[in-house]
Amino acid sequence: MPEVSEITGALAPTWCPGCGNFNMQKALAEVLAESGMRFEDYVMVWGIGCHGNGADFYRSQGFHGLHGRALPLATGIALTNPDLKVIVEMGDGDGYGIGGNHFIHSVRRNIDMVAIFHNNQIYGLTTGQASPTSEQFMKTPSTPGGVVEEPVNPVGVAVAQGATFVARGFAGDVEHLKSLYRQALAHEGFALVDVYQPCVTWNKVNTFKWFRDRVYKLEETEGYDPTSRTQAFDVSMSTFHELTCAPDECKIPIGVFYREEDSFTYQDGLPQLDRPMWKHAESPRDISAILEKYE
Amino acid sequence: MPLPPKGSELRVKIGGEAGFGIKAAGQTLARSFVHAGLEVFDLSEYPSLIRGGHNTYTLRISPRPISSHVETVDVLIALNRETVDLHLDELIDGGAVIFDPEATSTEGWLPSRKVRPVPVPLAKFAKEAGGPIMANTVALGATLALVHFPLEHLTEALSAQFAHKAPEIAEQNVAAATAGYAYVSKLAGDFWMKVEPEPDAPKRLLVDGNEAVGMGALAAGIGFYAAYPMTPASSILHFMAAHEREAGVVVKHTEDEIAAMNMVIGAAFTGTRAMCASAGGGFALMVEAFGMAGVSESAVVVGVLTRPGPATGLPTWTEQSDLRYVLHAAQGEFPRVVLAPGDRTDAFELTWKAFNLADQLQTPVIILGDSYLSDNRQSVPYFDLDAVEVDRGNLVAEGDIADHPEAVDEAGRYLRYRLTDYGVSLRALPGVTGAIQLANSYEHDEYGYGSAGEPADMRAAQNDKRMRKLELARTLVPRPALFGAEPAEADVAVLFFGTTKGPVLEAMRWLEPDGVKVAAMQVVTLSPFPADDVSVFLGAAKRTVIIEGNYTGQLQGLVREQCLRDVDETLHRYDGRPFSPEMVYAKLKEVADNA
Ligand SMILES: Cc1ncc(C[n+]2csc(CCOP(=O)(O)OP(=O)(O)O)c2C)c(N)n1
Ligand code: SF4
Ligand SMILES: [Mg+2]
């Protein structure tokens, strides 16, 4: 089984010093190392953005795909080789903006895979434009007068769309994030982990401190039941915060919002996916019985 | 015009409103003739509507080989008056019109010395048999009686068609057909046309182009097919989905074509033979990922079944105007193979070969067809399943990468994109021990790392490596197909691609009795372009002509660019309709006469 240093043993990260991506990599590498999986057992897929540059910083079987298209790329992998665990890393612009359509459909398909979002509420790689999760009225180079529209609420959307595992993490709390990753890896079905990942270069509002002052853990919240979809949806809405809110006015929950065990995964609906599908191309398929129907 | 002599073959056209089940009825008729050993070619014409609007189905039946539709009709089945108004002028002298006097008034077209009217109470017989929707089945029976063809082939086809539904529906349809047959046997037993079964003919298949593509993909061992519906490609999705469980294919109707193409690339990453298809519009959404297949050296097959554009264009009609588009789609430069089947046999063979080429070259392969191929059925010789081969190229699916020293560095690390002389690197699948690899949409180094692909020398080296595959491709792809006379001996030499093949081959048969010698070349592989073969062909000919279904002369442009020469004449069509052999005949005759 690979050690953490082997998993991160590719090229040296080029993220800005202090970027939330470092902690996200640390958390994931540690969880992968302890998971018992070999390099050959999982595939990572990345979108395009600062998060996606991580493709060079992991030693892993992987595919660094297009901006916004990591989920369908990963779906093609997951639906053709049941022996591979698929882990997808996306950005907020990447996965909720340009790839938003795939996000909704991947959730409702309940494809067995882990989907991690590096949610820095900004377009990092393209120098700081507003992202779909930038808060309303935030000023950026593409929105000098402030973002006009409401941000996307990924947790709420996922819960409403029938997701079977929805969690939110914070890159400032590695141990907590690791526990979310562990649970997501163990989940059978589509496991969404939306991670607040401060971008220290472009997002001067949602900083590490800003989050530290506001986050609280759902698992430490009395009466919170992560198997209740309505509760999860209510919390995802009630804590949908505003740009200017004071720390005691907007508390941001992190942890597992919702989980459903023994759900019907997309793979469960594919009895033909009983082996890696390349095995069908070891020799020509005999289609004589099919041709007979066309005589 | 030396059309096939009157009575030597039968052309039936059924016309009516969309929703009448005209295509289904026509296909049943087609199947009965194929069972009886005859050759058929059908043509469905319909607007992009589910109900209302005028639909036709034309079936050509012959005891001799045929390769396209024709413009003339011997028997017109008019399920409504509009059919008479729109198509009476296609009827040959002495041809018959089967119609229901209740639905189609005779005012203005009967009596006529040209037309043999066959009034049949279609609706009444249908109702008596079980329901008014069987009016077209009554008409099929009537047609067979008219041409003195035994009814049993039709009743067998109807029984087979409805076998999976309720048995009483099969019985009702047989009753409907029998009623029409009996009535017309009495009414028009003297009709001049006679079609006879060919009991000794070899077994044939009756398939449209999409079915042939689907069969080629299945035979090649496809394991994943993804698509978003778009005419005329949709029925490939239906075909694959219908066989997914029995054949073992994962078939995904995706949220859009972007997802389809990306999923197919993901599937190819695991070593699965994977394909998607759409019309030109859907391919537009695939284009960015199509380029990713190029740079990530993914072995994928993409069907582009074209229709008239731009944008939504004419959904249910045909055109060959996307040739340049598929040749150039996606930013950057990378090797691609483009294969254009001319008929259903080509479609089967080129599809299974496309999977081999994709694997051998580790690059995307396009099957370029059009509505004329996709939508229309043709009787074809049984597909040669013994000829199908699976060649996965330089692929390692299992084991340990350490056993492949040519693909690892000194430290034993796998070099997925190792720079090789012929451009193809060893492709070890995820799961092979030690074959840790990064596939990348970015330029990359030999391991696949993106930022390491930025240095100028690495960029150039990786680009060179990929482009070298084009030279390898030239040795692997199908060469142009030649028909007819030697170009030097021919009065006229014709160059074409894709489905123009059918009308050209048909017209060549008609030119034979005129003593016009024609040499024809079908450019089967459009990329890499067979410049040498085309140059030799055109160079040897006295008079040259290109026939293509577009306005701008896209194949002609390729000839100018790749062969540094031009042709004498061109024939274009871009009104949504396929070339007819009549049109091709007239053009080739004119060119030959002016030689
Ligand atoms: C089709 C396409 N459009 C635009 C881009 C340019 N682009 C690269 S990354 C990016 C946004 C990155 O933002 P996000 O997804 O939030 O990732 P981050 O950099 O913040 O991690 C954009 C617009 C692209 N690569 N592809
Ligand atoms: S720009 Fe922001 S997200 Fe990107 S590496 Fe720098 S700090 Fe991280
Ligand atoms: Mg971002």
Image: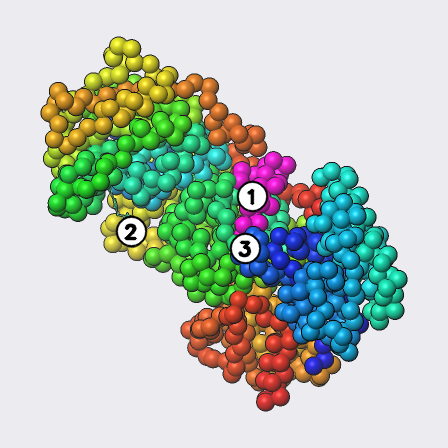
The quadrant of the rendering that contains the N terminus of chain A is: top left
Point out which mark residue B49 bears: 3
Chain on which label 2 sits = B
Q: CA distance from mark 2 to mark 1?
A: 34 Å
Which residue is disc 2 drawn over? B458
Point out which mark residue B222 bears: 1
Magenta segment: B232-251
Q: Residue furthest bottom?
A: B594
Residue at 86%, 64% in the rendered image: B187
Q: Nearer the viewer, residue B163 or B61?
A: B163
Q: Is residue B121 above or below residue B157?
A: below
Are the numbered discs 1 and 3 placed on the same chain, yes or no? yes
Circle 1: residue type: Ile
Classified by dominant secondary structure, the portion drawn in magenta counts as helix
Task: Judge left or right: residue B400 versus residue A99.
Answer: right
Q: Earlier in the sequence, mark 1 or mark 3?
A: 3
Q: Dots 1 and 3: beta carbons under 8 Å? A: no
Q: Is residue A249 above or below residue B88?
A: above
Q: Earlier in the sequence, mark 2 or mark 1?
A: 1
Q: CA distance from mark 1 to mark 3?
A: 33 Å
Residue B487: x %, y % from top left: 61, 79
Q: Nearer the viewer, residue B281 or A51?
A: B281
Q: Quadrant of residue B106?
A: bottom right
Q: Quadrant of residue B481?
A: bottom right
Q: Is mark 2 within 8 Å of ligand 1?
A: no
Circle 2: residue type: Met
Q: Earlier in the sequence, mark 3 or mark 2?
A: 3
Residue at 64%, 78% in the rendered image: B585
